[in-house]
Image (cartoon, rainbow, N blue to C red):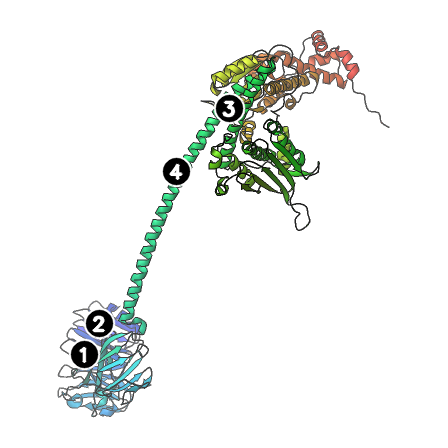
Amino acid sequence: MSFAIEIKPGQLIIGGQNGLFGYEIARRKLQRLAWIVPWERYSTKYNCAYAEGRSVWIGTQNGLICHDFRTKETLRLSTENGLPNNCIQGIAADAKGDLWVSTSNGIGRINRNADGTFSIARLDGKDGVQYGEMMEQSITAMPDGHVYVGGLNGITDIPPQATDYGHESLRPTLVGLRVMNHPINNEGTFHNRQLLPEGLSYTRHLHLKYNENFIEMKFSALNYDAPQHTHYRYRLEGVDKTWNLSSEPTGVCTAIYTSLTPGTYTLQVQAAMGSTSWGTTAEWQITVEPPLWKTWWAYAIYLIAALTLLYYIIELYIADKRSRMMAEQENLKRQKEQHLDELKFRFFTNISHELRTPLTLIITPLELLIRKAGDSSLKNDLEKILGNARDLLRLVNQLLDFRRLEQKGEQLKLLTVQIKPFIEDNVNHFCQLAYERHIGLSCECAFGQEDLFRLDAEKMTRVLNNLLSNAMKFTPEGGFITVQAGWQESSPAGEGPNGICITVSDTGIGIPAEDLKNIFVRFYQSEGTQSHPMNTGSGIGLHLVKGYMDLHKGEITVESTPGKGTRFTLLLPAQPPQTSSSNSQVAIKSKLPDTEKASESPVPEGNKVTVLVAEDNEQFRTFMKDLLRQEFTVLTAADGQEGLAMAREYGPDLIISDVMMPHMDGYAFCRAVKDDVQCCHIPLILLTAKNSSESRSGAYEAGADSFIAKPFDIDVLHSRIRQLLEQRERRLASFRKGTHINPKEITITNLDEKLIQKALECIEKNMDNTGYNVEALSADMGIERSSLYRKMQAIVGQTPTDFMRSIRLKRAAQLLESGQYSVQEISWMVGFNTPRYFSSYFKEMFGMTPSAYAVRHRKQPSSKA
């Protein structure tokens, strides 16, 4: 313990080496003082204390602490506040109330000012105070004003006037200046620039550049009697928030500031002697000029540039919005035009499809009349009508092709053809017309008879037909039309020709030069040809030709001289080698039924089969009924829904359906039929006005057995009906002949295959059950007896009872072939009550008794060598 001091009656403060504690004498309670804890970061060694009225002073190893019990405030004084040393050894108060403290290096007098601040006067060896460390608690103040302090070298007597320095007001003066660590002499020059025009001592305004913002200023109050007792405080307005205190033995104050930002600052400095009040404030104005890019006119330029940029951005934004708006308007306009074009195309397509049905009702009866006509004159007239009807059909087909081309629905179906016969056949179709109009027509092909080339034969046929048809229209009597074809030049690598070149030349009326660039534009017709009597075109033919050539990645060019003729040149590049996918495409195409040629198969003999016709057009429905009623029993339905109901009710042998029907179209009708277990076995032929590959693919994907485009050849329809009925007869014969049953061989749909497979499994499980009858089989399969009867009749041509018996007898035949059982044992194994009935039915089915069958078909055991 270093000390114990009474602060209140019965309360002590005890200080020592390890803390400051409060002690209550009455309660004998010792506890650490809470208010001292935050200050223990400086020191926990307490050397001395002094209590006065409302406060207590505590001397520590690192500063002097004062605590006010009334306000609960605590402060710390150190050398930064003017003490000679931070190690406080003793504290005492004189008669004036001033506080004296002894330290390890000097003595200080603390005077409390009226504003609550403290003024500190210091005494050291220069003032007559002994050198060296003062002893702890060795200080006392006498009533006469003398203060005695004990130290290692004796006792020091300090008279009352020792700290009386007079009341002269001190005013600091600038005595030194360094800029960027470079000293400024009295002339005030810096880097060949006059920094202090008025000299160092008289300067009150300092101008610095932006890169001269590191300064060091020295001040002196010019106190030569006791410079060590001169104290200073300074602050730089705009930088310092509080005063900076300074006290040096030399009596000179140094203020250092670094990295001053551009601006104007005011440096204020005050000086005082000992514990006297601060003197007059001395001020210096410091201006740091901004760099070129931070001057006001630079900021003005920045502002103007920013406003210009903002204006430019706003203009760009407005232009972008305007552009977007115009683009949206253009897009909307284009969409409206596309929508309008789509409506037009859809209208033309629907009209074209609607025209095909009436054309069918015209062409098909005409063909029948021509066959029956005996009068040659009448026959010629009918053939002319038929020719015009077919021309109308060609125009309708051309319009449909145009629509598919516009909708990007056309795709190449490349085939390898003999190029010379292909071109010659297309030209020969126009020989009769050329002969009738007295027009010369020649074809010159520089190909071998066996030369092959890959192209889309259907589309190239349309291209040649269109060009030759136009040439026929606009070539007068006595003119000439020439078709020339040959190989293009060989490729640089010598791998063969690059393609073929076909030219179609005529000596017709020609095309004006100004119209040549537009002749491939859809719906365009040259003014020079519109008045021509043979011009009946619509302006889409050459557009189709150009589109088909583009699909082949080829070129078409035209040269024409009005009054002399026109020359079209087709350049077809060689197509890449045929891949496996294209092979499969050709193979699939070869499997599709040929709807263009009629089969010579005879009509099946026997009872008439029932054919259901689903067609929404009443006239065409009546026509079909009249056409088929001589050979078949015909049922009719107005749409797919009615057709499906009739198929379930009557179970026809074959269905013929149109594609475009209300309520349920042909595709949906076909899928419904093939997904219905009651009628999925019925063959179905789709008739449609859409003669495209997409329509054909859609028909077969829906499950149709055949696809025929309108208008159709009567013989083709009859032939396809016969083929489908013959296929059914062959399946029935296959079932009757063999002893081994494979459901896949006697059915055409998965549903029928599963039904027969399930029936076989039920019969196999009950093979030796003599009581297993049709009712039990119907219950096991979950099908009504009447429905089961119709299905069995349609699939295998037998009633369920006959089917069950035939399965038992086929199993019996297999057992007889094995030779392991007797006839009587086998009859019981396959569910017959008596061998007599078994033998009777077996002979009826196989044409011989079981014993004879066993002898003829018994398997011989293999002999071992």
Q: Quadrant of the C terminus?
A: top right
Does residue 443 appear in the picture of this structure? yes
In what element is the residue under mark 1?
strand
For this rendering, which residue is in front, 369 or 259? 369
The span from disc 3 to disc 1 (Cα, nearest Å) is 118 Å
Asked which quadrant contains residue 651, the reply is top right
In what element is the residue under mark 4?
helix
Q: Amino acid at mark 3?
A: Arg
Q: How many marks?
A: 4
Q: Which residue is mark 1?
A: 118
For this rendering, which residue is in front, 611 or 132? 611
Badge 4 crowding class, 10 Å Cα cut-off, few under 14, some 14 to 19, many 20 or more, is few
For this rendering, which residue is in front, 791 or 703? 703
Q: Position of residue 400 (x, y in %)?
A: 50, 31
Q: Position of residue 777 (x, y in %)?
A: 59, 15
Which label belongs to residue 356?
3
The reply to whether dot 4 and dot 3 touch (C-beta < 8 Å) is no
Q: Earlier in the sequence, mark 4 or mark 1?
A: 1
Q: Amino acid at mark 1?
A: Phe
In what element is the residue under mark 2?
strand
The span from disc 1 to disc 2 (Cα, nearest Å) is 14 Å
Q: Amino acid at mark 4?
A: Lys
Q: Which residue is mark 2?
A: 74
Does residue 792 appear in the picture of this structure? no
In what element is the residue under mark 3?
helix
